[in-house]
Structure formats: C-alpha cells, structure tokens
Image: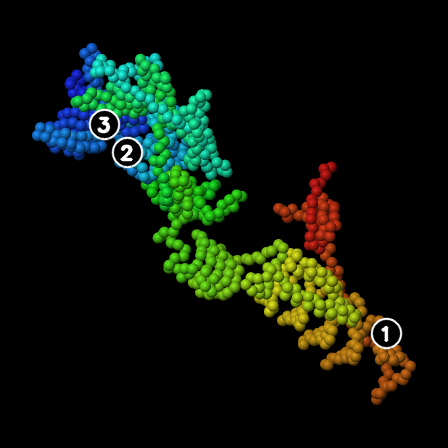
Amino acid sequence: MIKLKARDAFLAAREKEFIGQHQLYYLDVLDAPSSATADVFEFEGTEAIGDVTRYTIRWTHSSHELSPREYIGKMGSFLIQPPTLKWGKPESPRRKYGVVTAFAKLSTSKDQSTYEAVLESRLSILRNAKKVRFFHHMSEPEVIRQILKEHNFNQIWARFEISLYRSYSKRDIITQWEEDDFAFVQRLCRRTGIWFVSEEGEHCEVVRFGDDLTHYRRDASHENHQFPILFQPEAGMNTRGIESVKSLEMRARSIPSSYHVRSYNYRQAPYPIEATEEFHPKSGDSTMYGEQYIFGLPVQNKEDAGRQALLRQEEALAQQIEYQGKSDALDMAPGRVYQFSNHRLTDAKYGLLITKTICSASRAKGYEVRFTAIPCDRLYRMPLQEYSWPKIGGTITGTIASTEGYSGPFLDQHGEYVVEFHANRDPRLAGLNSCLLRLAKPFAGKYQTGFHFGLLPGSEVAVAFFMGNPDLPYILHALHNSKDTDAVNSEHKWRTRNVIHTERNNTLQFEDRINQEHVKLSTEYGKSQLNLGHVVDSKGEPRGFGYELRSDMKGVVRAGDGLLLTAEAQVKATGKTIDMTRAEQVLNVTEQQAQGLAQAASLAKADSPDLRAEIEWLKSELAGLKKPVVAVSAPAGVAIATPDRVMIAANKDITNTASGRFSVNAMKGIALAASEAVSIFAHKLGVKLFAARGPVRIQAQSDVMELVAEKNMQLCSVNGTLTANASNGVVLSGGGSAYIKIQGDNVEIGGTGRLILKIIDIKKDGPGALTLPKPHFDQIDISNDERYVLSDQLTGRPLSQKPYKITLANGEVVEGMTNAAGETSVTKEQAAQGIRMVLKRARKQ
C-alpha cells in the first residue's frame, strides 16, 4: 500500500506539471523510472468490444541501454493530454491502463535511441495461460468471474463489472480445451451474447461486461442520453477546435430471414429439441432471405434452443449494417453511443454504437480515430466465429470416480458415471469429479433392453465427444492399463480364451484352442458352475469332457412343460431336442410284454393290471413331453444310488416293467402293503417263497385262503409238527367218497369203500380233549378321515366359526362353517389332492 500511495503521489505531481505543456503524450510504467523521460513521438491504439485494448507506443530516449526486463510485464498507463484552448480550462489527461507485453529497440544514434512498447489491457496476460480445464455445474458468467479473479482482477491493478440483463443457466460441463484463458472467456461471451469493453477507471482499468441495450455507455446530461458530436466532412484544415466526425460510410448486407436450431438431449428423449426465430420484414423488404439451420448445439431444453436461435438472429442483425468513419474525438471509445447534432442517419436515427476504434498520432500528424459502429437500437452481439471453436476429434482418458469409501459401480438413476479426467488439475470433491456421463454400449434400447457391465471406481475409460463438441462428453469404452491388466494376456497360459470376468470372480469364458474348446459359466458363491466341452480346473488341468452342472450348495432343474433327462446320443447336435424315439420304443416293447402277462394272469384267475390307463398316459402325456412330465432315458442303463434313502410316491399308479429280471433286494426287510389286493403271478417257472431263518406266515385275516396245485402238494415240517386247526372243522378228502371230518368234539370217518388200518394195536381210552390257540386278527380302516383344520397364518391358532367355501380336486364344492376346533367337513386326504378355498365374512347379527 505504501508503494501504491507513492505512485499515486508521483502521478498526481506529474499530471499537474503535464497540464498545459507542449508534449501531448506520456508513457508511465510502474517500476520503470526511465519511462518518465521517454519522448513519445508516435503511437497507434486499437480498442474494440470483445477484444483486448492494444497501444503501440514509440519514443526516443537519451539512454541507449533500456532493458526489456525493466518494461515487459510491468503495469503502466498511456496518457493523452487534450490541447488547452485559449478560452477553456485545462482538461485532465486521458489514461489507458494496461500492462507492457512487448518491448523493442528500433534504432540508435549518438544522441538517442528509439524504442517501442506495446501496452495492452490486463486481459492480454490471459493469453499466456493456455489450458485444458473443466468447469462443472456453473453458468458462463460464473466461469468468467472465477477466471478473472484467478488473474488478480482485484481492484488494485484492474477490476471487472458483470452486470447482465438476462439470466444464464448452469451447465453440466463447460470445457476449456487447449485455449488460453482470454480466448476461452472470449468464446464464452460469443456463444452467450455477452460482450465486454475495457475502460478507464478511477485508479485502474475496468473490464465491463454487458448483454443489453441498457449497458451501452451514454451521456446522461443530454436529453436523448447520447453523446453529441458534429458531422463535419473534411474541407480544408480548419476544425475550429471542435471535435467532429470527418468522414462516414455505410455498408449493408443480406442476412437470413429465419434461424432454426435443432438438437438432441438424451435427458429430454425421445424427440429432438428445436426452436425457430424469424424476422417479419415489411412488404417489399428484400434484405432478408433464407433459413439458417443449426444442428448439434449442447442445448438443455426448448427454451435453451430458442435462446440459441435468437442469439444467431441478433448476431446477424448486429452485423447487417455497419458504419465506418474518421474523427478526432478524443473520448470516442467502444461501447459508447454517439448521435450527430447536425445530421440525421436514415438507418441509425437513434445514434451509433461504437464497436471498434483505431486511434493514432505522431509528431507529423494530429490525433485521428478511425471507428466502426452499428445502429444503437440493435443489440450488439460479438461474431460467433463457430469455425474457430475447439473440437476434440479423438478421445481423452479418465478414471471412474465415486464418493469416498464407495464400493461397486457408482451410478445415478440413469446409469451414468462420474469420471476423473486425467487432463483435469483442479481439486475436486470425491463424487463431484465431473458431470454425469453416459456409457456407450454395444446394445441398448426400449423397455430397458441393453447390455450392462458396471464400471468400478478406478477403472480407466476413454471419453469421446459428440460431434467433437468439448461440452458433450460420453464414455466410449473402458481400457486396461499396467496396473489393471487384461484378463487374458501374454502371461496367461490360455491366450486363446475369451473372457467376461467381474470383480467377484463371476466368469463367462470361451476357449477356442483346437480340441480343447470349452465354455464356462461360474459364480464364486457356492462355486456354482456350468462347464461345457473340455472341462479344466483352476490350474488348467483337464477334469473331464462333455458338460458339468455343479454347485457346493443346492441345485434345481426345473421345466414347467416337461423335462427329458437322456443319455441317448444326437451326433453333432442333430435331431429334435425332445426326441424320445428310443425311450418310446423301450416303453412300447415292455408295455406289450406287460399286456401278454396280464392276459395270462387273467386266464389263471390271478389279478391282472389295468394297463389301459398306462397306455393312454404314454401316448397322450409322456410321448413328446406333451404334459409336464419327467422322462429319464439311457441306452446302457439308469442307476440311482444314495447312502440314505430313496422314496417314490405317486397319487395314482406305479408301474415297473422289465423285459428281463426284476429284483428287489434289502439287507433288512421288505414290507409290501396294499390297501386292496396283492397278486403275484408267475407265468412259467413258478413262485418260490423261502425264509432262511425265521417263520413264514401266510394269513387271510378276513376271508378264505386257497392253496391249490394242479399236481402234487406237499406239506412238510422237517423238525417240527404239522398242525391243521380250523374253528368250524377239518375235512380230509382223497379224491373219492372217503373222508375224515373233524368238527367240534366229533371225528367222522366215512366212505363207500373200506377202512384199512395197518397198525399193531388199537387202544381205546376215555374221552380226551385238545384245544389249540386260534390267532386274533386286529384290523383298521386305513382311509384318512381326519378333518382339515383352518388356522391363522400368523398365530397358527384354529379359526373357529369361520364360514368357508372349498372346491375339491374333482370339482365338488363344499361349503360350511368351522367348528370350535377350526375343523371343516373336508378330510385331510381330500385336501392333499388339491383344494381351492374362499373364506367368507361372517354376517353381523
């Protein structure tokens, strides 16, 4: 601050001395004392809306050794002292603030040297900062404000004012791509309709930003608020000391009559976004013709598209009519509005907005300013120059980012990712590294159809840009690198393998090595796998061939329309998938054999199986898997083995038919029970029933028993007694009329022939008695008449007095109300066959 106050004091004193002096131009460079004695003999200055102020100043100096280091990069100002009129008060000098950006020594002589310096507005130093940078969730004015603050536009060396009429939306991303900061700020202004001018402030340069007619610099002291000036074409040398415009020319051109902007924003899918702005010229106006069509701008919605169309319309209108002239007005500068006090312009009746000035003066020529202007009733818009905007033709790299400590793919509700661009150097909060980016996929479509493999944080990706626009990025694909190498590489034994491999070792791999082709689908949970072809282990060693479906956990094979498990070959995958020809042949043969045996059993008065239902089932349900059945077939046999138990259950019939032997073996016991009847029939070689140990018992507990043989019958007890016992008597008959009948307490021997006794003696004693025990048969009806109980699903308690309506499997409808125990009139046996139940609300009494 002490240094700044000393500078101000020096300038004030110098300015006081300067007033009224012959020298009209003065160079003041801070920290360059030699500038105080610089004799300016020539200069040229260029100022324009939307560009850097540039003054090229040439001077002589008595020193021959002025150094560039003394000037370049130093803050300074160029003073222009208006001439003092005899009848007027001296004016303060005009100051052009800036920074010295170039220095040259042009010539030297014995007495002096000639130098040149370029003084530009502080905005010029932004050209030295070429960058790649990404701004997220900011509007263009916010980005401009941030950049200027970073370059110390801090109200000491320079300051800025941003006063805008329109509102500006925040953008997901604004990319600065290989542009210097000034070119970037300038481009942001071009594409939004913002303009800026560099002006003289009280103590420093002021960069003023605007976007509306009200932001033009006007003269509030005049009624029409325009700066007045005379239009006085050159006619000799006499200007009478009054500033005026010496010459003026106007040029006009044809412009399009309408502007149509069309683009596509996937967040506004599925239709393109478009808007049109049209001029409505008066009848006979031929200065406007045609439509300009612009596609592919990064618009967010229809309103945004409309603003882009309007911007292009305003830019064309601002360039349609242009005035060029010459003047000696010292204060004429871009952004100011002038109006002739003695002349009326047909196409600029409200005055002219100065857009550019080139001023110059020398010892041989007085002050002159060449200017460019447009009618001030038109909004000024900087030329878009879209051809100069950066394009990104290829891709840039980045890394998938996430919030701190997040695991797994970090996605939003649209499946978009955050990427840390490798080109980015600005610090970012985790999870806010970039805007959200879509991932290009090989397949995507309606109804959430698509192809999805989540990208993990830290994954390297290549980012591309729609139409090369730096503000339209998307993730093109993922890449491996030296840290995260490819799943298959030169270090991998199976380099012919094609693999999809996820973070948790979920794998889909295809091996294309000749004669070792295989496919593997696996997950680490339960080590569940489907292996096809040449099956190998984790070390690549062969484990088998064919296919394997395995899991360390539970497994289910389910097919709602039927399932065929077969070992029948279909070479090279030929034939129908449910071809059951071989199985059906075996079933038909055995079925025919079973029919023959059934006929033989029927003739022998044995019970024969009813095979009609089985034959119908084979044809109408099993064949071709017409119904949801399971068929098992193998040409070389089927084996079922378990160290525990095997259970076979059927609500209808079980039929076992074999063309050869049927064997049932059990190391403990065999229990055979039938609710109705058991029939054993041997067609040719008889029936053998042996017990190596233990008794053999044959009982008809509620009916007769017949032991019948066509030939001999032998009843023999090798080491015991043969006892015949019947409650109603025993009758022995030998084929004729002779018989022995034992009944109750009597023995009767009769016949029409002789009674022959071949014994030594007959002994007759008194009455004797022998009572043999008779077995008692305990029987039970095995029908299940236990009642079906309704119970509460949550508490398990029976529902008493609950109305119900139950439809049984046979279609019968049963209605009623449960009793106190929750029992219905339906038995558990009926319920087991399948029911459909409707519970009714009890009527209120």
Q: Secondary structure at mark 3?
A: strand
Percent across and percent down for residue 145 are 33, 30
- Name the N-terminal-most of marks 1 and 2: 2
Percent across and percent down for residue 318 are 37, 25
Could you tell me how far apart the alpha carbons at marks 1 and 2 are, in whole angstroms?
136 Å
Q: Is residue 704 left or right of residue 265?
A: right
Could you tell me how far apart the alpha carbons at marks 3 and 1 are, in whole angstroms?
152 Å
Whether tag 2 and tag 3 are in contact, CB under 8 A, the answer is: no
Task: Name above or below for residue 430 compared with residue 189.
Answer: below
Which residue is tagged 1? 743
Q: Quadrant of residue 768?
A: bottom right
Mark 3 is surrounded, within 10 Å at the Cα level, by few (under 14), some (14 to 19) or many (20 or more) other residues, namely many
Which residue is tagged 3? 55
Q: Quadrant of residue 623?
A: bottom right
Identity of the amino acid at label 1? Gln
Name the foreground residue: 623 vs 333.
Answer: 333
- Name the N-terminal-most of marks 3 and 1: 3
Percent across and percent down for residue 489 are 39, 57
User: Which residue appears at 68% of the width and 46% of the height?
Assistant: 799
Task: Name above or below for residue 358 compared with residue 587.
Answer: above
Q: Is residue 429 visible?
A: no
Which residue is tagged 2? 126
Name the foreground residue: 604 vs 251.
Answer: 251
Task: Name above or below for residue 788 compared with residue 391.
Answer: below
Tag nearer the camera, 1 or 2: 2
Name the foreground residue: 771 vs 316.
Answer: 316
User: Which residue appears at 44% of the width and 21% of the height?
Assistant: 284
Could you tell me how far apart the alpha carbons at marks 2 and 3 are, in whole angstroms?
17 Å
Q: Is residue 263 left or right of residue 702?
A: left
